[in-house]
């Protein structure tokens, strides 16, 4: 045999090397049979599998007890279904075994987080919310809005209103821009769909005007069942060439000067959002309207109402004449 033909010294050195390798492979480490039940080290946490990571290295990194490269390779040869791990960030739990973790990494089911973008808020408010969302990269500032507008092909310089309020799920590494891109697509698709089925008698020249109206409705009431009635008031006023005279547009127009109260100077301020001064709709939305507000703007109730006033509890009193309205104001506002 060729082995016997080797010089004795060479045979001794080769045998010693093999024994040394096996000793290193076995000493201080688990056997391949034990790897099926070995637990993860540490507490529950987020674990990131980097792009290009090998299952052998991940296994050794996660195991609560020492695992040699030799036995990890052997074990993975016996479990080839655990080798095709996918890059990503995963939520692993204390008490899991390494097999459970590797199965998760093979599935690619990364940890999912969510952020809620609230209807009725402005884009500046949303940027603040996104900046505080966990594991969301690349926060945006107001200085980034122009580049976002160009990227999304929004024609208007003010991008207010063009994003759908919703709870958005995301994984580690997503960005604020990713979320807003999805929110814009949601709003655009929803607006286009409902515009096609709109009430044909509406006094809007474009879907964008409907979006402006929806934002006003959103700010005027949080009661979903009142929104079509609120919409009817504004539609009736537009059709009669009456000023809308809605306070939320005044507040949007004075912006940082608003101190919690609307003053006479605010009502008289000659800015394009002051619907006590201008005719018709303001030039842009004043907030992010939700689906129900968009639906109300495109499908208002059929009424003769021209006025409304808050009567408490979020509800409103509606009137058809100025005399009725003045009486309602006296009852629900002045006498409170």
Image: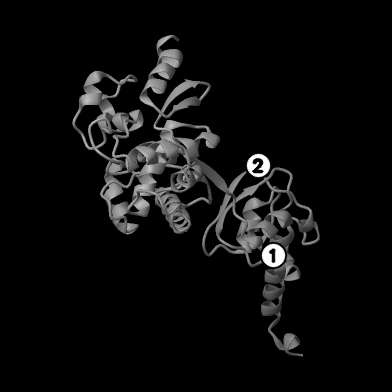
Gap between marks 1 and 2, in whole Å? 21 Å
User: Residue shown at 29%/56% (left/top)?
Assistant: 150
Frontmost residue, 312 versus 54: 312
What residue is at 34 percent from the left and 54 percent from the top? 206
To which residue does mark 2 refer?
44
User: Is residue 104 placed above or below 46 in the rendered structure?
Assistant: below
Specify the quadrant that holds the C terminus.
top left
Could you tell which of marks 1 and 2 lies nearer the N-terminus? 2
Q: Quadrant of residue 212?
A: top left
Provide the secondary structure element on which disc 1 rests.
Answer: helix
Q: Is residue 165 left or right of residue 254?
A: right
In the rendered image, the residue lying farthest to the bottom is 1
Q: Tell me where residue 271 appears, x and y as whole percent.
A: 20, 34
Looking at the picture, does residue 331 appear above or below residue 27? above
Label 2, secondary structure: give it: loop
Label number found at residue 82:
1
Considering the image in quadrants, where does the N terminus appear?
Answer: bottom right
Q: Quadrant of residue 154?
A: bottom left
Q: How crowded is the residue under tag 2: few (<14 C-alpha within 10 Å), some, or many (20+)? A: few
Q: Measured from the top left, where is residue 248 in percent x and y? A: 35, 31
Front residue of 119/150: it is 119
Q: Is residue 45 above or below residue 336?
A: below
Q: Is residue 134 visible?
A: no
């Amino acid at each position: 045999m060729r082995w016997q033909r080797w010089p004795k010294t060479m045979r001794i050195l080769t045998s010693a090397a093999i024994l040394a390798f096996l000793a290193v492979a076995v000493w201080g480490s688990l056997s391949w049979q034990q790897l099926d039940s070995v637990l993860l080290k540490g507490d529950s946490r987020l674990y990131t599998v980097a792009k290009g990571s090998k299952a052998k290295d991940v296994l050794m990194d996660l195991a609560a007890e020492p695992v040699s490269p030799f036995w990890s390779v052997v074990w993975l040869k016996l479990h080839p279904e655990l080798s095709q791990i996918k890059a990503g960030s995963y939520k692993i739990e204390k008490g899991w075994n390494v097999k459970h973790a590797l199965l998760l990494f093979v599935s690619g089911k990364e940890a999912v987080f969510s952020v809620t973008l609230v209807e009725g808020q402005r884009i500046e408010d949303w940027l603040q919310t996104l900046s505080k969302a966990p594991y969301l990269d690349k926060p945006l500032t107001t200085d980034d809005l122009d580049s976002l507008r160009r990227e999304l092909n929004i024609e208007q310089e003010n991008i207010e209103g063009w994003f759908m309020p919703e709870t958005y799920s995301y994984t580690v590494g997503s960005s604020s821009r990713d979320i807003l891109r999805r929110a814009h697509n949601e709003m655009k698709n929803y607006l286009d769909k409902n515009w096609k089925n709109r009430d044909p008698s509406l006094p809007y020249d474009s879907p964008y005007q409907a979006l402006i109206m929806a934002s006003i409705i959103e700010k005027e009431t949080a009661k979903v069942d009142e929104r079509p009635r609120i919409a009817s008031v504004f539609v009736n006023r537009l059709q009669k060439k009456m000023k809308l005279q809605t306070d939320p547009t005044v507040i949007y127009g004075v912006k940082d000067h608003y101190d919690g109260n609307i003053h006479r100077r605010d009502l008289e301020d000659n800015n394009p959002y002051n619907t006590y001064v201008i005719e018709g709709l303001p030039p842009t939305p004043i907030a992010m309207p939700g689906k129900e507000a968009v639906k109300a703007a495109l499908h208002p109730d059929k009424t003769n109402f021209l006025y409304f006033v808050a009567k408490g509890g979020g509800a409103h009193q509606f009137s058809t004449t100025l005399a009725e309205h003045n009486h309602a104001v006296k009852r629900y506002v002045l006498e409170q």
